Image (cartoon, helix red, strand yellow):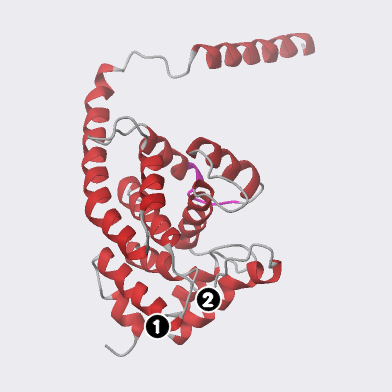
Amino acid sequence: MDNFAEYILNEENLSAKMEITYYLAKKTKIFFDKSVIFKTELARMFIDYMKIEVDRNAILTACLLCNCKKIDNAQDIEKIHSYAKEGAEYLRGLGFSKRFAKMCEELNRYSGSNPRERESDVLELVDQFGGMLLDRPERIGFQPDEALVLLEHRNLKDIYNRYLHTFQEFVEMLENTELHDRTDIKTLRYLVKLYNEATDVKEFIKVVCYEFEPKIDEAIMKYNEHIEKGMFEKSNIPLFSEETTRKILSHIAMENEETSNTN
């Protein structure tokens, strides 16, 4: 291979990509910890389960590398605003294309890069949502439903992300999916538990790729089969809940009354 970029992009196995990045980080001291693996697995599931039309290989590679210049100091506002752009420049030096670097730069909105790549919107969602699920020194991790509310109404308030609603559907699907031997804990909380229990990055890579992935992939396949089977059985179920139906009917009645008064 001519350069690192070609080497890792030509590696199709995700666990191998993770290990390649792990050794790069050991050698070059770029940012790479368990949270990177956690967010990359979120991206893998989102792309695979929701069938979104993006460059899967590029996104998963970018997930592993886009935070390469990140630092752990949350108080360094200048660094928070610049690390994605600095990381993009660093990745260009490793042989990655201009488009790939742009995708990584658009991990957040601080550089003002526009128009955004489709893949960048996926990176933004998994980076922000995944980060909210994990504990930080100043707070404990949020529950998935809490993180979704914060994602939509705080982090992305007045900001357009083309995959936001699809991502919300994805999280809801995961929350309704039971892992065969872990029915007592929701899927995302189980992944967080594995994250907390892993002692280091290499251990977490093994747990995610060889224990978690097979379980969740099988569970999602059965979930989809159940949904497809139930589509016909539930054809007579009302589209909205009783409370929502009352609100809609009340709104329609008010509109009719206003129209009547106008006439």
* Drawn side of residue 236 relative to residue 12, left or right: right
* Drawn side of residue 11 relative to residue 250, left or right: left
Q: Residue at x 50, y 82 (%)?
A: 90
* Drawn side of residue 92 relative to residue 114, left or right: left
Q: Nearer the viewer, residue 199 or 72?
A: 199
Residue 14: which quarter of the image?
bottom left
Q: Which residue range is magenta in the image?
A: 160-165
In the image, what residue type sits under mark 1? Lys
Q: Main secondary structure of the magenta part?
A: loop
Asked whether the viewer can see residue 206, the reply is yes
Q: Nearer the viewer, residue 240 or 171?
A: 171
Residue 57 versus residue 6 in the image, above or below: above
Q: Quadrant of the C terminus?
A: top right
Please state the horizontal and vertical placement of residue 214, each as a whole percent of the image.
21, 48
Please state the horizontal and vertical placement of residue 114, each as a whole percent of the image.
60, 67
Q: Residues within 10 Å of mark 1 (few under 14, many from 20)?
A: few
Q: Residues within 10 Å of mark 2 (few under 14, many from 20)?
A: many
Q: Residue furthest bottom?
A: 2
In the image, what residue type sits under mark 2? Gly
Q: Residue at x 23, y 66 (%)?
A: 13
| Residue position for label 2 | 87
Q: Nearer the viewer, residue 58 or 35?
A: 35
Residue 152: which quarter of the image?
top right
